[in-house]
Amino acid sequence: MATLKILVVDDEPGIRSGVSRILRNFRVDYPFMDEPFDFEVLEAATGEEGIEIIESNPPDILLLDNKLPGIQGVEVLEYIKKKQISIVVVMITSYASLELAVKATSDGAYDFIPKPFTPQELKSSVENITKRVFLKKMTTRLQNTGKQIRFTFLSVLSHELKAPLNAIEGYLKMIKERQNGTQLADYDVMIDRSLERIKGMRTLILDLLDLTRVESGKAKRNITRVDLVSIARTAMDTMRPYAIQRDVVLNLQTREPVEMDADSEELEIIFNNLISNAIKYNRDGGRVDCLIEPSDGNLVIQVTDTGIGMTPAEIEKIFDDFVRIKNEKTKNITGTGLGLSIVKKLIDHYNGRIEVVSNPDAGSTFKVILPTVKPCS
């Protein structure tokens, strides 16, 4: 059995002892894990004590209260960020401090737990955090070990399909047994939720296929002369129904045609992800502009939206595997956290680069620069 260390930094003895008691015999186990996880709980009453433990006996997970004697929780968070210490930080906060907790998540905290919390709420949060810690460690190993870990990724993602399938099955049984009544309208909410779950699973499967193709290196690339304008237009046509639902205007700005030697499927993945994200994270009644043009021996693809934007700290994370930005604006937006990671990997295949300019509530611009030199097949 593997053990994760959890450090609780809170000046309330009842909170510290409560966490220790709740997690004393708690185990987290998923089918994709080699062994279950249990927990060793460390305690600190002040931020200073917490930093001492972090330096001498670094935990995997930090449960951090903000209101502390001496230095505050956000200062501990800033210390961890400055030192680049690899710890998953979760803020413990009263309901009156939710605004502060949301800000803390934008500064590097993974999540927050409002208090008072029930044992089940704490266990549920720790369960999700444990999965994140495991995935993070597995991602690091993936960069070094390759094939075997990719199979583990498949297991993880297969597991992620079980929850929506169980939900859909439950809804179908309720509909079959007419549990809500005999009128079709009685089941509209269940049908809508099932369709949303199916949409999420389809996205997950497509992202998984793209990721395995990019990571495996086995699929033969079909390098031909392709027109980026045609590929961009197809991507926009594919996304247009979703844009219409959000009342988002799609605009393609380009000199026609703009050609390069590339694999058309890889460019489709790049355009599909950038344009779909620009719609997904936009505001209702917003706009997406896609510009394609030659520039200094390169080809530039630029996708600009009028959406919710990002902070500099959020921009640093968005190209990592399984990373999704979590804040009040994104809490109802679904996704796998793989799209931009795949885009970055594909751009690397072309020895290109991607740049991001974004500000909260002011939209984002993703700029892809691709050399015109023919890539290896």
Image (spheres, rainbow, N blue to C red):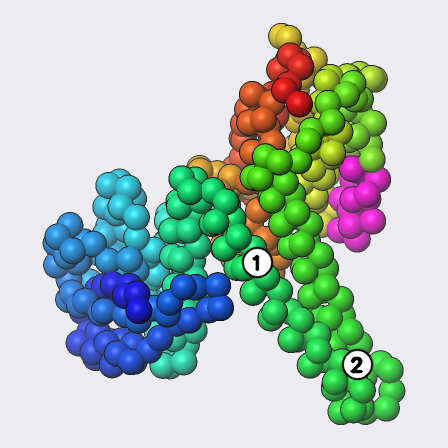
Instruction: Please count the marks in the image.
Output: 2
Residue span colored magenta: 235-250
Residue shown at 79% from the left, 30% from the top:
231
Residue on which disc 2 sits: 187
Distance (Cα) linking label 2 and label 1? 29 Å
Does 254 sit above or below residue 18?
above
Residue shown at 76% from the left, 66% from the top:
195
Residue shown at 71% from the left, 56% from the top:
202
Q: Which of marks 2 and 1 is in front?
A: 1
| Residue 223 visible in the picture | yes
Secondary structure predominantly adopted by residues drawn in magenta: helix
In this picture, residue 288 sits left or right of residue 42: right
Closer to the camera in the image, 116 or 27: 27
Residue on which disc 1 sits: 157
Residue 242 shown in magenta:
yes
Residue 31 appears at what percent x and percent y? 49, 68
Residue 367 appears at what percent x and percent y? 60, 26
